[in-house]
Amino acid sequence: MIMNAIKDIVLAVTYQCNGRCRFCNIWTNQDSFSCELDDFKRLPRNIENINISGGEPFLREDLPEVIRTIKNQCPKAKIIISTNGFMPCKIKEQMQKIIKFKRDIGIAVSLDGFGKAHEELRGFPGGFSLALETIRLLKELGIKNIKIAFTLGNQNINQLKRVYQLSNELGVEFSLAAYHNSSHYFQKEDNKIVDIANLRKEIDWLIKQELKSFSLKKWARAYFAFGLFNFLKNKKRILPDYSGINSLFIDPFGNIYPSDIWNLKLGNLKKVDNWDDFSEAMNLKILSNKRPESWMICTARGAMKKHYTKVIPWILRKKFLTYERKQKLSNKNNLFSLMSFPRKRESSKY
Ligand code: SF4
């Protein structure tokens, strides 16, 4: 008997969306959702991370009740809501209700560039200021776990630095993803990043920034960025994929998939009575099918925890190299200042 080991779930609660993003066709869906509150009572109880996604989750009028049901069903879960941030007032109104019973809820607001760059990618004029207004209102509500979620694509590689710096100025976290292809989720299969040389430069810069900090979370994000670059360049993950074993994607109709990338229908939430029995059947299906390559946080997080013996040495090595480079630079500067000392005295002679 296989015990259920699912720890991470991406749960799309609606396909309704007000965004018109270039790299995603979810908004073209006619049907929005069919999972009702009672269906969420079937989620596995021992989940550790749930990402409430969409579409735009805040378009669901009953979102606070959805979160309450999930919180009661999965008491250990860290819950984070992903939003495009285009409806600041509605988001504030719903979050006011949510924080009354889930104070530590997290929220990730998408921002893929500065001003027009973001708006063009997201197909939403005025969307940049709206997203910033959402962040301001969330901070006003006292929400601590706020992130800017940057989705990397061909058109916004050169926007990464500015958005990262903006996240620092706003005092919120920064998380990185790259657009992927998916027939059942994003419903887009021609996303491709081609400017690998530029990508390397930008991701190297980001890794350095994250490693400069004293935060374990940021060091882990540096490793994630390293994995993302490798995936985009070589189309291969640097760590194994446990989707379907430790993580799942569930769509707004209750359909269960190993991930938002892997279009292998495993069952439906509305029919799962026992997660151990379901895991057994799920594992058989997973083992007899070919896994597509991907590097998304929902599947990388578990792999990074499991393979910490690869992650920690990488972080230490990178940090040591940065320290060594800094030392060399400071030695060089010291040498120059020593060399310039007699010159100053010489010049004072004249
Ligand atoms: S990426 Fe998000 S905001 Fe954009 S269309 Fe897809 S679901 Fe909507």
Image (tube, helix red, strand yellow):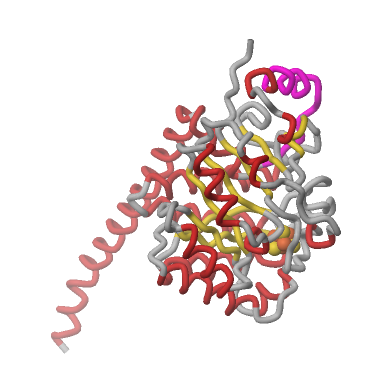
Residue 148, x across and y down, in percent: 53, 62
Question: Taking 118 as reference, is 28 left or right?
Answer: right
Residue 64 placement (x, y as % from top left): 55, 56
Q: Report the front residue among 131 and 292.
A: 131
Q: Quadrant of residue 196?
A: bottom right
- Read off the magenta span: 279-294
Residue 293 located within the stretch drawn in magenta: yes
Location of the C terminus (image quadrant): bottom left
Quadrant housing residue 18: bottom right
Q: Is residue 61 above or below residue 67?
A: below
Q: Does 246 appear above or below 345?
A: above
| Residue in front for this viewpoint, 126 or 154 | 126
Q: Residue at x 15, y 78 (%)?
A: 345
**Quadrant location of the N terminus in the rendered image:** top right
Relative to the observer, which residue lies in front, 132 or 165?
132
On screen, residue 78 above or below 238: below
Residue 132 percent location from the top left of the image: 53, 74
> Taking the image as four quarters, which one is ligand 1 found in?
bottom right
Identity of the residue drawn at 43% across and 33% down: 313
The answer to if 99 sits in the magenta stretch is no
Residue 216, picture quadrant: top left
**Residue occupying the point 39% across, 38% down:** 316
Q: How many marks?
A: 0
How far across and down, in percent of the image, does residue 25 sit? 81, 59
Q: Residue at x 42, y 58 (%)?
A: 100
Residue closer to the observer: 76 or 231: 76
Specify the farthest residue to the front.
38
Q: Could you tell whether 251 is left or right of 175 in the image? A: right
Vertical side of 340 occupied by 4: above or below: above
Task: Report the residue that reaches farthest toward the top.
Answer: 1
